[in-house]
Amino acid sequence: MINKIVGSFDEAVADMVDGATVMIGSFGGPAECPSYLIAAVARKGVKDLTIVGNTGGWGPDLLAILRERMAVILTIPEDWYDPGLLVGRGQVKKGVLCFPAAPARVLTPFEQGVLQGQVELELMGQGTLCERMRAARGGIAAFYTPVGVGTVVEEGKEVREFNGRKYLLEHALKGDYSLIRAHKADRYGNLVYRGTARTFNPVMAGASTVTIAEVDEVVELGELDPECVVTPGVYVQRVVVRPKELRPWDEAM
Amino acid sequence: MINKIVGSFDEAVADMVDGATVMIGSFGGPAECPSYLIAAVARKGVKDLTIVGNTGGWGPDLLAILRERMAVILTIPEDWYDPGLLVGRGQVKKGVLCFPAAPARVLTPFEQGVLQGQVELELMGQGTLCERMRAARGGIAAFYTPVGVGTVVEEGKEVREFNGRKYLLEHALKGDYSLIRAHKADRYGNLVYRGTARTFNPVMAGASTVTIAEVDEVVELGELDPECVVTPGVYVQRVVVRPKELRPWDEAM
Amino acid sequence: MPGERLDEQVMALRAAKEFQDGMIINLGVGIPTYCSNFVPPEREVLFHSENGVIGFGPIIDNPDDADDTLINAGAQPISSKPGMAIMDHAESLCIIRGGHVDITVLGAVQVSEKGDLANYIIPGKQIGSLGGGQDLAFCAKKVIALTTFTTKDGDPKIVKECTQSLTAPRCVHRIITDIAVLDVTPEGLVLREVAPGWTAEDVQALTDAKIIVPPDVEEMTLL
Amino acid sequence: MPGERLDEQVMALRAAKEFQDGMIINLGVGIPTYCSNFVPPEREVLFHSENGVIGFGPIIDNPDDADDTLINAGAQPISSKPGMAIMDHAESLCIIRGGHVDITVLGAVQVSEKGDLANYIIPGKQIGSLGGGQDLAFCAKKVIALTTFTTKDGDPKIVKECTQSLTAPRCVHRIITDIAVLDVTPEGLVLREVAPGWTAEDVQALTDAKIIVPPDVEEMTLL
């Protein structure tokens, strides 16, 4: 019998080792962030990770400030643990990111790490990052995109002209783990998302050897409309359900 | 106001000219085939078309035989007009296809055309065809696929090694028209499909300058669940509703 | 004189024994289609069809129950099943090309001792159809060729070198036939099982391909 | 002495006049965000946000009405609207990279007279964020830079050559500022409109970029 539901977040990441490449499906808000999986990686304490995703995260200190400042326009939940938690704890050696720098003069843990020479940055736009992950999921070795020619992104890459326009060769990017956030799952690992919390999550599903989905709810087989399944279970190896009550990141669970 | 609903099939294809590249979203059954759009192209009589899709179709004569033979396992509707209609009428000069040959000793109109030297064939597998169309939709110039190396598909193509495996360079394939079949549409051109009638149809949407959707039904804006829209309207230029009653292909409509 | 040749249903039954719990399986048209009827009951496998569906149920043979919006890659009507998911053709082929299909069972016109597969042109025809079969042959984790050992005319289908145009070179891992099961290995074609009443010599006599016979060849068990 | 500079809301209002009925629009963070408040009422445009939504409604400013599963690329809560569609990030970027966005309005740190855009590193910072902005700058059908003409310190932002690292070379079609509207043309930077009370000479005095002044320069109309 196929049953991808795993009993705990700690169990879900138990086989992660130092040096792993970890895709993290957070965009920039709490709803699309696999917070409890990130917390479990923090607890596990694996080091020298390469993280892949949109941002390097805020980390707990900046999130606390953000929570206060943003309160008038947005309620930020207490259990939003983002990639900055891992960066701040020194677990990350490299980030393949689109949004490493805070859109303000404040410095994120990732920016601090880069400035201190402890963390390496590979910067690219969202289209290229998405396409590189999809290429890994879909068995494409590399592709030519027009985006980045003549900019910092071009460095070290092949430039080639097609129909009079220049393109960069970009390679598939495969991870060891994809940590993603979804709304509902069934035991096959079929997933649906909610609104813009979909974002990078389905793109990372299947782009790593092991894809782990943190979900709000597990439903019976057949409850998900086959027409509306966004990620077929074939791309998902493990599913963990989020706790109903808020839990601190450093508590085993 | 945005309103992509067009009053008739003839109007929908009125600007098609000789020599156009026409993607046709049929897989191999009637439900996924844009039959009335194909009929309208037949009526319009444009010539020297390049058709792109899975099959070159059966054409009316073989479909009549198939309808009779298959009756014990499948009811085939009378108003299934497939790409073979266009091939049989001499409107097609080339096919970019995965399934040009009938899976039996019978010859399709397309096979006959090739054997008589009247029609050119560019053969490739479904993965490569889909990916070439998606590349056109998504602004990718070309990509490397492992499929086809060392076979007839390789001829004339660049072979390149990545991580010890050989890949073929395949180019984006853009059409002038994509004729697709969907279940429901709204006036923005948002589309949903039914079951496996989805197949190539959403892949072709947005891969041509003009995408025309033949649909069962037009619904009010807001009736389609935003989470379940498969093709966002941005990829669709025109929508036409199928007649409730079966209509012969050569009747203006 | 060798034993009887297995019929198509029994060949499919033998192939289905390869399916392990949790596997993603894609069946080619023809004899491979029958495999879905013989999945060992204690195993749950998901069938994938390249036109964009995974986890579907049995093929429907009564047209009154059929819905033309649910068909497999052979255009046969299939049934819905809890846990099924629909996707577009490009995503469906990502599943194949990305190596997410565990086993594909494909028909064959010829298979060489190197594992070359020729199956996209029907013998006697000049034009072939690649469909989704080429993607499967190149990219599935395990490719099983399921075919009679010889043609109806007695010509070998398991051969030293394919004379027909290739679907994919060096792609076949295991060959399941009506008289034997063979593996394609770096050393060559290795005999694993023979049908009841058949010997290694009987099998070798029907092909110019060199068949390696290890000491532990078994009789095909079909239950 | 020139007239007053337009404020951010009025700049956004002017930019929104570019939106034609039926267009797909993507707004960058900062001042461009305000454009959605000024769509001419007789025109229906669809806003696209790279995190995977198209056709959404206004930004929500009351946290009680906000849902964190519906945000724009600037992580601001937005409202649902009939005809809206959700997609994943890869498809959303296909819309951008495939040239399906009619107009993108982006903020700028510098724009050169050749249309080079620098906007991914905040001045004074060493590390920048490309986000989805680079894809938009390279691939939208029309790129509008919406920015004050000078920095708060009075340094020109419309320049002969960018000194900051480029987001995209030669990508900007039109520059809308607090004192003028200019087009990037093969001949160079062409002045199209000036803010009330401003002359072509006033504008030229604030930049080392060469501004071509055709005879038909108009005063910016804001209603």
Image: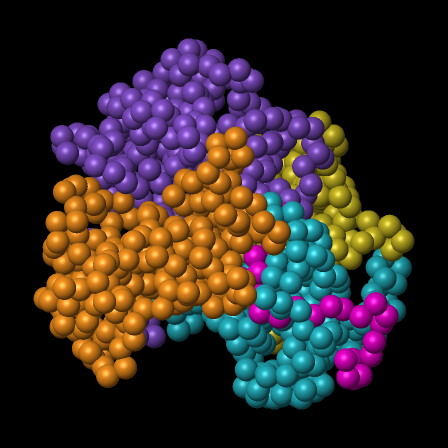
Chain colours: A purple, B cyan, C yellow, D orange
Q: Is residue B75 left or right of residue B152?
A: right
- Magenta span contains residue B245: yes
Q: Which residues are magenta?
A: B228-253
Residue displayed at 66% across by 56% down: B221
Give the residue furthest to the top: A251
Residue D138's place in the image compared with D183, above or below, is: above
The front one of A196 and C211 is A196
| Residue A85 located left or right of residue C82 | left
Relative vertical location of residue B152 with respect to residue D85 in this rendering, above or below? below
Q: Is residue B194 visible?
A: yes
The residue located at (26%, 23%) in the rendering is A88
Query: Residue A148 or B232: which is nearer the viewer?
Result: B232
Looking at the image, is B137 positioned above or below residue D54? below
Residue B129: % across, % down: 52, 64
Is residue B170 something one can see in this rendering?
no
Q: Quadrant of residue A23?
A: top left
Q: Is residue D78 magenta?
A: no
- Identified at 51% across, 27% down, the residue is A214
Q: Position of residue B169 (x, y in %)?
A: 38, 64
Q: In x, y percent, where is residue C19?
A: 63, 36
Q: Position of residue A199 (x, y in %)?
A: 47, 43
In the rendered view, tell whether residue D61 sits above or below residue D15.
above
Return the residue nearer the eye: B169 or C70. C70
